Image (spheres, grey):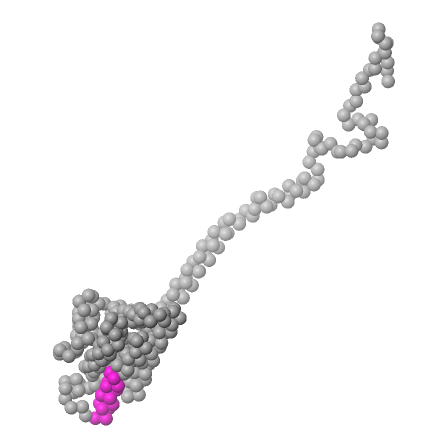
Amino acid sequence: MDYTATQSGFRQQPSMRLRNSPGDSPDGSQLFEDTSRAGPGPQAGYRNQQAGPQTAGFPGQTLLSEPMSNLAMAYGSSLASQGREMVDKNLDRFIPISKLKYYFAVDTVYVGKKLGLLVFPYMHENWEVSYQQDTPVAPRFDVNAPDLYIPTMGFITYILVAGLALGTQSRFSPELLGVQASSALVWLIMEVLVVLLSLYLVTVNTDLTTIDLLAFAGYKYVGMIVGLVAGLLFGKPAYYLSLLWCCAAIFVFMIRTLRLKLLSEAAAEGKLVRGARNQLRMYLTMAIAAAQPIFMYWLTFHLVR
């Protein structure tokens, strides 16, 4: 230290120490390294090299991704269209979707007349289906044409009325209603299959299709609904009386309708049926008609108490 003399004594001279001078510590080393003025080291350069390709990206990546995505979308849409065409083609072989529109071409007038014909068929005279250029006219233009609207609505209404009957007897449950619906559907399918097998065994050449048989078999739900409603409103005697009337009506309806489809032209005109084949056709017609009252009673008797 330097001491200078003053009037009041000695005064210590302040010692000026430079930054980063070797005299900062006794051993000449610092506790922390000063990086404020240091340039970019090798580690920083390495990090910049790693971040560079990720941020910049491949130059042709965007150009290649758009054509590839468009190609994938076009290929996927072509596969979807081919699959849809294949499903439609195979489905049309078993269930003619295009022909179903014919069976639902009905109106209010047709439905009213058809329901009246199913309940009271005794006064109806002309049972032949009208044709236009070898094609049957739509049901709304001919009350004799079969349809699927009344059988479908009849089946649904039958299930609803059955649920109502079970509810009035404190026996309603979703499981029991499901059993009722499934059993009715199974019996309907079995009936149509048996009729188809019978037609094949008897070798009947007829224009009846599977959908026609399904329609004719579904008409019995109208009489079943009438019997159930009468039983719910007026008791069991009313059920038996109304069901008996509807069973007789559906028997007459089926006989007069199917004889034009199954029997020969001579039988359709009311002449004497001759020949073993015509006898088999007549028995088959009567068997189909007689099966309707049996199914009507079997599917409704346990719902009325």
Q: What residue lies at 18% left-to-right and 90% top-to-bottom?
A: 273
Quadrant housing residue 286 = bottom left
Q: Position of residue 173 (x, y in %)?
A: 38, 69
Report the quarter where the C terminus lies: bottom left
Q: How many marks?
A: 0
- Tell me the magenta residue range: 275-290
Is 18 contained in the magenta span? Answer: no
- Looking at the image, is 207 positioned above or below residue 283? above
Tell me which secondary structure the magenta stretch mostly adopts. helix
Task: Locate residue 143 relative to residue 201 in the image: left or right.
Answer: left
Report the quarter where the N terminus lies: top right
Quadrant housing residue 285 = bottom left
Q: Position of residue 7 (x, y in %)?
A: 84, 6
Task: Look at the image and tell me whether residue 209 can be seen.
Answer: no
Between 259 and 303, the one nearer to me in the picture: 303
Q: What residue lies at 23% left-to-right and 73% top-to-bottom?
A: 234
Q: What residue lies at 43% left-to-right and 58% top-to-bottom?
A: 74
Quadrant housing residue 187 = bottom left
Between 202 and 90, the one nearer to me in the picture: 202
* Residue lying furthest top: 7
Task: Locate residue 19 relative to residue 27 in the image: left or right.
Answer: left
